[in-house]
Image (cartoon, grey):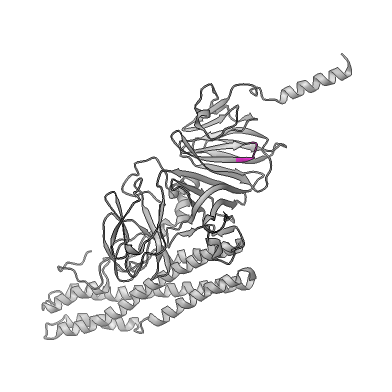
Amino acid sequence: MSAWTRIRVAVLVLVAATVPSWAAAAAIKVSQGGVDVFVPQEQFRGEMSLLEKGGWETLLPERLPRAASTPPVLASASLVAAIDGQQSVISLYGRQGNRLAKRGDVAWDGGRRFANYNLVRSEKGARLGAEIRSSDNRVLATLYLAPDGILEIQPGEEKDLTIGNARLKYGIVPSLIGTDFVYTAQSGTSGGSSASNRCYLPSMNLFVGLVEGNDSMLVGVWPPGQQVASLRTTGSGSTKGIDAFSLQTGGRSFYLALLERPHIWHSEPLQADYLERDTLIGWRRPFEAKWIGRFHVASEEIDYPFYFRDARVELWGRPIRSWFWWPVWFDGQRTMIHFEKRFPPKGDLLIYYLEKHPERPAGTAILSPVEVLQQALGRQEAARLLDLAGIEERPVVSHGLCVCEMTSRLQRFFDAGREVQEQAQIARYADDVATFISHVRQRLLEFRDFAAQTRQLLKARAADEPKVADAASRLLGLLDEFEGVYQGAMPSASLGEVRQWTAEFNTLAREVRPGNDKKFDAVAEKCRSVSGNQDDLVRDLSVLAIRLAEKAAQEAVQSPEHAALARDVIARTRQILRNPTPLEVRRHHRLAPDPGRPTEDDQEMPE
């Protein structure tokens, strides 16, 4: 054998040693806990028939990792992620049974070509996945798919990703405290960036995209960090749409899920003839959840998410001043809306959900966006990011009665000549009236401190970052309004004066005398006046805080720097809005008594 022949034989042996032993074998399938990974012999084209055919060579999960030169396909009951080696993208499909719907393509900004793959598994949650490698065998990214359909994308050499061809109608940045921030293809023009096709978002670790066609929601989750999130728009005029979501990951994992059901979200323009009418609309909830109806409340100048109720109810104050009929509710399976002159039907009604119903099962194996966050990052971290503890209402006094209600009950004692009999009850209510006014006064001071600290933040950012100076100036204008409302409505009576008034309740109760009822009413009216003004003010300041957050979210679209400013301002508004009193605007409402209507019967004060 010549030297040249020996060299050729050695090269052939070496090449044979580097080719996987299964390269010419049948197509491979690995399954574990509701997740399948397929290595097909032909390119996947979005049809279940390729995955349902027989002839797969079964590989046990314990045999992983395993090299593959053919792009794998990852599949769960709700999501299929097909690696496309030719285009160097991951094609995403929502799955309902045997039906697949293309929902987008994940690509990386670095644009490096896919060359080969490794099938892998993770002990966390019985997940299966695949490493995507470059021609020089560097890991570009690793995918892990869980049985619940949540796909984790771990960055390798590639960091920044885009989900293209997403066809989103709305993009939502949820916040269970305050309000959700909703973006459309036209949102980018509101911040003065109409020439750009990029709309930046305040990075708050959860994104919900409502897909055109009303049958899919794309949910993205990422851990806290310095990530930059944005939407990309395409087209113009009436054809303009959102075609991509992008995230600069900062090297942290990104999680996504596709929530698939017909009519899983809905929007429709509100008509003028809906005014002052109970109106039946055509949308029907596809399953039980905490459904939200969001629209613009003209009287308060905010977009607000109203949770659907289970009956037609009337409510006092909060998101809308005075008495109003709750605007969205379910009448059995029917969906009802009601609009009034204080919030006329203008713009669009957007219906979506973020959470499961706490008392009724969904009846379908579908996640909520909040559950995707909880599953991806863990319940403890999700509770911190959502601030679930901050959702709870703080009572002003332990029994929850307002000053008008307490004084109305006491007035009946004096009207009936029972003041001496009810001295103990009068003393308790006298103390609670003063405590109520004192606690609300303290809450008002918290709002004022919030405004002062936020003002300092905005001035400092404007000085340090000229790029955001104009946006900061516009936000400062809202804080000027905030201060004006505070100064114009804060009662002049001191808390010491209030204590003197409530002490008179006890003085009058020592002896039954003619005219006690009128004297009590005169003193009680002073308390009601101070309390009423404070109650209205604390509600109005909570509305202004929400308006400030919404304005910051609108400013975010212009650049990553604007988005970072918006995130910081929104974080401050969420802090002041957490654990609200019953007098403030709050996402999770319970029915409150009318401050002007006494109860029908005298009741002992609850312990």
Camera-nearest residue between 125 and 316 = 316
Which segment is the magenta one?
Answer: 85-89
Q: Is residue 423 above or below residue 590?
A: below
Residue shown at 48%/44% (left/top)? 258
Q: Residue furthest top?
A: 1
Q: Is residue 386 visible?
A: yes
Q: Magenta-highlighted stretch: main secondary structure?
A: loop
Residue shown at 49%/46% (left/top)? 376
Q: Is residue 273 left or right of residue 76?
A: left
Q: Is residue 515 left or right of residue 94?
A: left
Q: Is residue 587 above or below residue 166?
A: below
Q: Quadrant of residue 112?
A: top right
Q: Quadrant of the N terminus?
A: top right
Residue 404 placement (x, y as % from top left):
25, 74
Camera-nearest residue between 395 and 546 = 546
Camera-nearest residue between 386 and 192 = 192
Q: Is residue 513 above or below residue 177?
A: below
Q: Quadrant of the C terminus?
A: bottom left
Residue 424 placement (x, y as % from top left):
18, 73
Residue 190 placement (x, y as % from top left):
54, 65
Residue 119 placement (x, y as % from top left):
59, 32
Q: Could you tell me how many numbered marks the image carries?
A: 0
Residue shown at 33%/66% (left/top)? 582
Q: Is residue 578 visible?
A: no
Q: Is residue 8 magenta?
A: no
